[in-house]
Amino acid sequence: MIHINKKRTIYPAAPSEAQQIKLSCLDLTMLFAHYSQKGLLYQTPADDFSYYVDHLAEKLPEVLVKFYPLAGRLTTSPLDGGIYILCNDSGVEFIEATAKDLSIADLTTAEVTPAVEELFALNGAVNFEGHRLPLLVIQVTQLKDGVAVCCTLNHAIADGASFWHFFNSWSHLCRTNGNKIPGNPVYDRSLLEPPGSAIRLGLDPDGHIQRFKAPPLRVKLFHFSAHTISRLKERANEDSSFTISSFQALCSHVWRAVTRARRLCPDELTTFRFSVNCRHRLLPPLPRSYFGNGIQGIRVTATSGELNSLPLSFPAGLLNGLIEGHMDGVIREKIDKWHKEPVVYKLDEFEKNCLLMGSSPRFEMYENDFGWGRPAAVRGGTANRFDGKMSAHPVREGGGSVELEICLPPSVMSALESDADFICPSSLI
């Protein structure tokens, strides 16, 4: 359905400022996960495609001057066994593609179709393969009534905040025709953990890559209006001794609903996982523009019976306590523990009956105007999808509404769709 017209390598407009950057423990935990995949759809006149492509490609070398690690490769040091970003200006891959039979409407249905997958490069690539693969691949696809600009970025070198920092900076340069980037990226890993010998994980760059294969899943988008979320927040705070946030209330609502849809026995455990941005939680805090993985995974567990029988304030209180308590001391403790017992996350090792919330409605996704208007929609690729994976996005209109992409087995998704308590306070896209 999508035809690849051209592939080329784009290099920074100036040599990299550093030779190599050591990956931190928060980076290294992501080595066996997939590359991150997020893309934006723009409603533009189709006959101007060559203009859009040239404009994007022209500004990319300039933005890579500041985001120079993206043009490098991973390397394992023969001296200390540590894994580094080798800032050797090998370049990023830039792909031009055509899908003239696909419209934006085809790609923005509530049920995510396989066509969305084809908008992204490196499907199934594992971050550790950054030893030989580009760390960033951009695919620009001509649609029937617009353009898709989709990025596949190595998650071992950047989390969601860093991903959108790059995207925002690139669109800013294109829109303004300038050369200044708001918030220059900061790469100093010593701000996160004490300098010292690199962790020797003993991974062979030329060895076998163990790939995760997800079971059959349905992927669907659910829209929660600001009014709905406000009502959920009020309900969660009714008999709570904590101050529950809007997002905590929404997560709790979804956790309960998916647990019901899974039809678990009352004593079966279910886990809610999400990543906490540690930048502002550390003392001293990391710069907001710290480029890397500044997140730690946290989790909370309850029984199905507790979630089904107790009010919304119960799971919301669990989430709130976990998030509010995750400050400098806890973060440093987890970093110290990791250095003693290194762990690399694997997608097939999460708990049974797990939910994992990814991305964030706070990311400035719809602010990416390359000079032809704001995006019509945000879409994710197949990367890191498994039973219970969710991604949160803002909505184009703003105002506090949230779009959730939820991945579940077909039978569980059908049960979720027919759950009146889940659907009634919200609306399906």
Image (cartoon, rainbow, N blue to C red):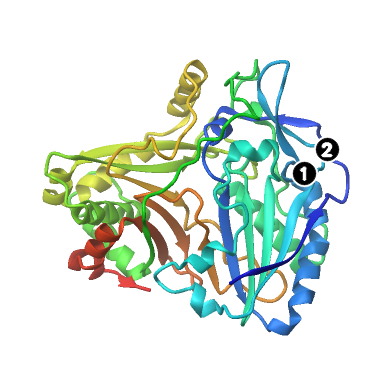
User: How many discs appear?
Assistant: 2
Q: Which residue is mark 2?
A: 17
Q: Residue at x 66, y 22 (%)?
A: 82
**Relative depth, front residue between 169 and 217:** 217
Q: Position of residue 262 (x, y in %)?
A: 21, 52
Image quarter of residue 113: bottom left
In the rendered structure, the answer to whether residue 301 lies left or right of residue 374 reads left
Image quarter of residue 318: top left
Q: Where the N terminus falls, by quadrant?
A: bottom right
Give the secondary structure at mark 2: loop
Image quarter of residue 19: top right
Q: Position of residue 29 (x, y in %)?
A: 52, 32
Mark closest to the chain's N terminus, 2 or 1: 2
CB of mark 2 within 8 Å of CB of mark 1? yes
In the rendered structure, the answer to whether residue 371 lies left or right of residue 336 reads right
**Label 1: how many Cα within 10 Å (few below 14, some 14–19, many 20+):** many
Q: CA distance from mark 2 to mark 1?
A: 8 Å
Give the secondary structure at mark 1: helix
Question: Can residue 240 be seen in the rendering of this structure?
Answer: no
Q: Residue at x 21, y 68 (%)?
A: 418
Label 1 amino acid?
Answer: Tyr
Q: Position of residue 312 (x, y in %)?
A: 20, 52
Q: Residue at x 57, y 38 (%)?
A: 293
Q: Position of residue 8 (x, y in %)?
A: 79, 57
Q: Which mark is residue 68?
A: 1
Label 2 amino acid?
Answer: Glu
**Label 2: how many Cα within 10 Å (few below 14, some 14–19, many 20+):** few
In the rendered structure, the answer to whether residue 355 lies left or right of residue 25 reads left
